[in-house]
Image (cartoon, rainbow, N blue to C red):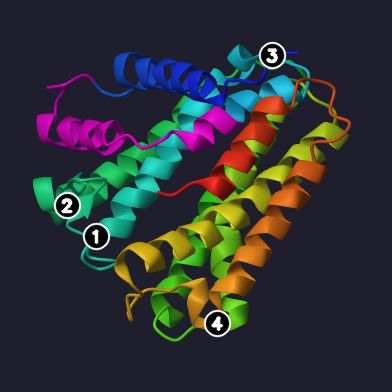
Amino acid sequence: MAEFDLASYMAERKTWIETALLDDILPAAGERPAQLSAAVRHAVEAGGKRIRPILCLASAEAAGGAAGDALFPACAIELLHSYTLVHDDLPCMDNDIYRRGRLSAWAKFGETTAALAGDSLQALAFATLAHTPEKRHGALASLLETFGEAGTGVVRGQVEDILFGASPSRETVDFVFEHKTGDLFKAACKAGAIAAGADGEAVSALAAYGARLGLAFQLQDDLLDAAQSGADPDELSCLRVMGADEARALARSATESALAALKGLPGPAEPLAAIARSLMDRKA
């Protein structure tokens, strides 16, 4: 059996998602009000690996469906993620001038336009999600609930991050990681399964995979940030409440739990397994 080509898989899915987002879903360049359309497109065009939407597509396949079943939820989860980043960068939040090597939305378009662009992205996420064909009765309601819970969870995590980030307890770090990062990973995988028409067992398994993967991802992020630039005294990090060795061990354990959740799924789970392993081994 040929070895799974993760790089090609990720590149193909990323292109598919970005084409749908930029050509079909986002407001056209210049659409009135042009300033808002430009800010919305700037936020999504900033790119990144598109991990969450790719997880959504892969989860649909692992649940026994096709990747196309989950294209709308995949695009919607990227819009929801983009909104959280736009708001996270605002001066009243993390006050970040740059995002992925480019000016953040507020630094380029002003704080007011950026805040409204984030609002628009969140609303567009739900509008996009509503186009998902129902392969199982009640699927759309379940998708809307999943996205609503994830959006609320991210806000809950952000509030605790802002309030206690400079001097967190272990409980605070766990809460922020579970909600600010983990809830979007969980929603991406759960939504893919729901869109594929999966039964409750497969939906639960993929939700568990996503939640554990989100934890491992954030732990690894903190380790990489510390190695590359040192600890920022004003930012929440797992390294404020545990040593690097403990964080690495916890990330490995979370990854192993995520992989264990994939056993017994009706469709191909190798893409999800390969993604989990690659995130654990990444250097940036």
Given this view, does label 4 or label 3 mark the residue nearer the observer? 3
Which residue is label 1 attached to? 90
Distance of label 2 from label 4 (alpha carbons): 32 Å
Say whether disc 2 or disc 3 marks the residue closer to the N-terminus: 3
| CA distance separating discs 1 and 2 | 6 Å
Q: Secondary structure at mark 3?
A: loop
**In what quadrant of the picture does the N terminus appear?**
top right
Q: In terms of sequence position, does the residue under pointer 1 or pointer 4 come before the other?
A: 1
State if disc 4 and disc 2 touch (CB < 8 Å): no
Magenta part, dominant SS: helix
Percent across and percent down for residue 212 are 68, 52
The residue stretch that appears in magenta? 28-55
The type of residue carrying mark 3 is Ala
- Label 3: few (<14), some (14–19) or many (≥20) C-alpha neighbours in 10 Å: few
Is residue 214 something that shows in the picture? Answer: yes
Q: Which mark is drawn over residue 175?
A: none
Q: What residue is pinned by disc 3?
A: 2
